[in-house]
Image (cartoon, rainbow, N blue to C red):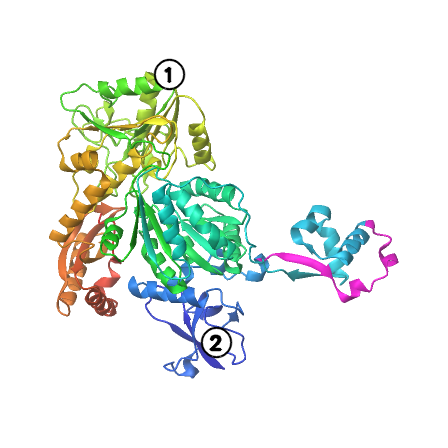
Amino acid sequence: MTVVRVALPVPLRQHFDYLIEANAQVQVGCRVLVPFGNRKLVGIVWQLDPNNSFDSNKLKPVVAVLDTDPVLPALLCQLLSFAADYYHYPLGEVLISALPALLREGRNLADYQPKAYQLTDNGKQLDASTLKRSAKQLALWQTLLRHQLTESALLQQYSRATLKQLIDKQLAEEIIVPPQPFSAPQIAAKGLKLTAAQAMAVTAVTQAFGRFERLLLEGVTGSGKTEVYLQSIASLLSQQQQVLVIVPEIGLTPQTLARFQARFDVPVLCWHSALTDSERLHCWLQASTGAAAIIIGTRSALFLPFWRLGLIIIDEEHDQSLKQQDGFRYHARDLAIKRAALHHCPILLGSATPSLESLHNALSKRFIHLPLPDRAAGQALPQFELVDLKQQVLQFGLASQTLAKIKQQLAQGSQVMLFLNRRGFAPALSCQECGWLTECHRCSAFTTYHKQSRQLVCHHCGASKAIPRQCGGCGSTQLKPLGQGTEQLEENLQQLFPDVAITRLDRDSTRRKGALHQALEDIHGSGARLIVGTQMLAKGHHFPNVSLVVIVDVDGALYSSDFRAPEQLAQLLTQVAGRAGRGSCGGTVLLQTHYPEHALLQDIINNGYASFARSALLERQQTCLPPYQHLAMFSAEAHQTDPCQQWLQQVADGIAAVATVQLLGPIPAPMERRAGKYRWQLQLYSANRSSMHQALEHILRLVSSWPLSRKVKWQLDVDPTDLT
C-alpha cells in the first residue's frame, strides 16, 4: 500500500491522506471515492506518496479509483490551485466545482462517452445460416460485418432488443470511440468589410497568436466588436486550435452561438447553467478531446478542460455577472487572464464600457489597447437629451415631451425601447391613510408587488406572500401601488398605445423556457413596437429598428454608498443608449431625471464614457481606491447582530497586529438584514497585494479556533465588486 493525498469538497483548508494499492493506476487529477466520517465522498488525487504523511497505520484505504486518466489536466490543476490560493478558498471545493455535476456524483465517465458496436471474433466467423430464423438479427449482423456502427446510427435502423440479442450471444460488442479533434474549417459565410480600426485590431490579435498577450478592445456600441472576434479566429481554427468565448449572460449565448455557427463550419457548443447535466457533460467531453472548436459560455466555462486552447475572448468584460457572488467568489475575467498565461495564448477583452481596472491596465501599458471609436456601418452615435421632471405632470411616469417623442417614432414605423431597472408592478404597496409600506419580514427591504401573480415578493431573499386585504398598521383597506415597475409600465403603455405591439424583457417574462428566444424573435420582426425591460436589454443585443431609447428613471442610481456606483451607472447608461440608432435611422436617448445638472449625467452626455472613465480613474487615485489599492472584504451574518460585530472585531484586531492594512469596519452592511440574518462587513485596503494576502493567510489560520466562528456564517471576498 502507498499513500495518496486527496482534496475533498469540504469547507476545510487542508488535504486528507488515504492508503491505496501500490500498483493502482492513478494519477494526479483523477477522481477517487474515499470514506470521510460516516460518508463516502468523491475527491481529487492531489499528490502521490507525500513525504509529510501521517502514520500509515492510522489511514483509511481508498474505496475505489474512478478514473485511470486525469479528469483535470495539469494546466487546469495549476489554474485551480492558483485560484484557491488567491481567493483563499478550500482547494477541494474549488477542484470539484470545476467538474460537471455527473462527475461530481462519481458517475463512470465511460458511460457518457460516444459508443460504437462491432462484431466479436465469434461474430466474424459466424455462418450466416445460424441466424436465418431471425431476419432482424441477420440484417444487423450483415451490417456490422461490413463496418462498425455508432450508437446513434445503429438505433436509426435497428432496435435495442435486436442489438442486445447479438451481444448476449457474444456475436457483437460495445466499444468506446473517443471523439476526434475537429478538422480545419471551411468558411461558411463571408465576413463583413472591416473599417481601418477593426482591421488594425484583427492584425494585433492574430500577431499575438502563440504567446501570452492581453488585449483590450474598447469599441463604442455598434462598432463591430463581434466581427473582430470572428475574423481574428479564422486563421486560428485552421491550425486546429480551440477558442473560448465567455459572455456574461445566458441570454446572450444563443445569438452569439448563431453568429459563430453561421460563419464557421466547425463544432460550436454552448455552456451555461440552463443545460441539463448530460448536455454539460457532453460539452465537457467535446472540449477535452478537441472535438469542439469553439465553446461559448458563461463564467464557469473557464474551467473546461481544453485540448488545445489558442485564444480566450471575454465579451462585455466589464459586466458584474462575471464575478461569482456566493461560495467560491472568483472573477472569471481575472482567472481567464491567468489561464491564458498558463496556455501561452492571447486573451482579448471586449467592451464599449471597459471596467476601470482594465482601462487602468491599458493606460499603464500592461494591456494592448485597441480602440474602435466609430460605428462599423458609419451610423452616428445616438444623441442624448435630458428631460427635467421637476414641476412636470407625469402620465404613467412619462413626461409629455417623452410621450410626444414616442408617438413620433411609432408613427414612422420605428421601435422604441423603454428602460426601467425595476421588475414587478410596483416596488411596494402603501396605505393611503397612514403611509404603512409592505416590508419583507426577513430583510431590511420592501416587498415588490407583482400584479399578474398576485404576490408580494422580496427580490433579495425570494420570500413571497399573498396580497394583504388590510393595512398592517391601521387596518385600512386603502392599499395602493407605490412607484412603478416594468409590469406596470407595460400595462400603462397598452392603454396609451392600444394598437402597438409590446414586448417586455425581464426575469419574470423570460422565466419560461424558450420565452427569451421568442421575445427576441418578435423584436426583430418588422413594424412599430414598444420594448420594455430591465438591464437584460443592455447586454449586447442588436436591435436595428430601435430609433428611440427612453431611460424612465435614472435618479435611483445617482446616489449610493458604493464607490463603484458611478462607474456602473455610466456603463449601464452607455450600454442601454447603444441599442438606439444601430440601423439605417438615427438614434435618440431620453433621460428622465429630477437632477439634470448632475455632474455624472453631464459628463456622459457631453463627453461620453471614455472621458468619464478617465476622470473617474483620477478620482479613484486621489481617494486611494481600487484599482490603485487592493480590496478584500470579510462579511459575517447571524440571527443576532452582536456576534457578527464581535467576530469581525476579532478579525480586525488580528490583522492589525501583523500587517499595515487599512481597515474600514466592522460596519453594518448597506442592507443590514437579509433572509432573517443580520449582516456586517470589514473592508481591507492595501497598496501592496502580497501584504494583503499574507495578512489574510495569517488570520484564516486562526479563525477556526475561535468559539465565535461557530456562531456566525462568514465569507471572505477578495477583489469584491458588490459591497451591499
Q: Secondary structure at mark 2?
A: loop
Q: Residue at x 15, y 61 (%)?
A: 649
Where residue 111 appears, as percent x and y from the top left, is: 59, 59
| 29 sits to left or right of 639 | right
Three-letter code for the amino acid on which mark 2 is drawn: Pro
Identified at 20% across, 54% down, the residue is 627
Q: Which residue: 80% across, 55% down?
A: 142
Please state which of residues 300 and 689 is positioned toward the viewer in this rendering: 689
Is residue 600 toward the left or the right of residue 516 in the image?
Answer: left
Q: In front: mark 1 or mark 2?
A: 1
Q: Are marks 1 and 2 in contact (CB under 8 Å)?
A: no
Residue 306 on image: x %, y %:
47, 59
The residue to which callout 2 is attached is 61
Q: Secondary structure at mark 1?
A: loop
Q: Which residue is mark 1?
A: 498
Compared with 110, 376 (above or below) is above
Sort mark 2 into few (<14), some (14-19) or many (20+) by Cα contacts within 10 Å: some
Q: Quadrant of residue 480?
A: top left
What's the distance in space between the residues labelled 1 and 2, CA to CA? Answer: 72 Å
**Label located before the other in sequence (1 or 2):** 2
Residue 388 in which image quadrant: top left
Residue extending furthest toward the front:
196
Does residue 524 appear to the left or right of 631 in the view shown?
right
Residue depicted at 28% across the width and 42% down the height: 460
Given residues 129 and 543, the one toward you in this image is 543
Residue 88 visible (yes or no): no
- Amino acid identity at mark 1: Pro
Q: Mark yes or no: residue 35 visible.
A: yes
- Determine if the magenta segment contains residue 134: yes
- The range drawn in magenta is 113-135
